[in-house]
Image: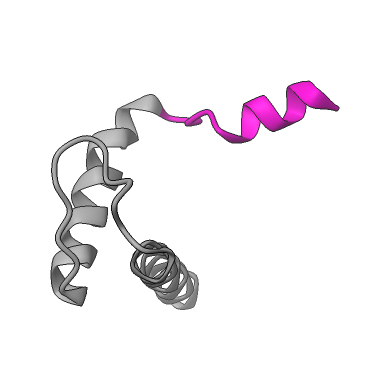
Amino acid sequence: MASSSNRSNRMEVPEAKAALDKFKTEVASELGVNLKEGYNGDLTSKEAGSIGGEMVRRMIKKQEEEMNN
């Protein structure tokens, strides 16, 4: 079981990392959260959660749109 938790932190498509980082930066900017290059451990849980939640909402919306076309 321990090995499965390691796999969940690994990117399935490593080339997508740059695109996800750009997406995260764009979402954070729109939400008024200042991200800096590298470590952002000074973010509050609310700030970090709002970025992640909005990213997921947008990804789901895009997938739903693609499935409807």
Tell whether position 17 is magenta. no
* Residue pictured at 44% horizontal, 69% vertical: 53
> Eyeballing the image, is 34 above or below 4?
below
Residue at the far right: name it: 1
Which quarter of the image is occupied by the C terminus? bottom left
Please identify the quarter of the rendering in which residue 8 is found.
Answer: top right
Q: Position of residue 3 (x, y in %)?
A: 75, 21
Decide if residue 9 is on the left or right side of residue 60: right
Q: Position of residue 49 (x, y in %)?
A: 43, 66
Q: Position of residue 65 (x, y in %)?
A: 41, 76
Quarter of the figure with residue 13: top left
* Viewer-side residue, 17 vs 28: 28
Q: In terms of depth relative to the viewer, which is nearer, 45 or 69?
A: 45
Write the start and end of the magenta stretch as one range.
1-13
Is 10 in the magenta?
Answer: yes
Point out the image quarter for the N terminus: top right
For residue 66, above or below residue 24: below
State which quadrant residue 21 falls in.
top left
Figure label count: 0
Color theme of the render? one colour
Seen in the image, is 68 located left or right of residue 14?
Answer: right
Q: Where does residue 62 sit, x and y in percent of width and height? A: 38, 70
Please give the name of the residue rendered at 37% of the width and 61% of the height, measured from the top-left corner: 48
Residue lying furthest front: 42
In the image, residue 24 sits, relative to residue 12, either above or below, namely below
The residue located at (15%, 74%) in the rendering is: 32
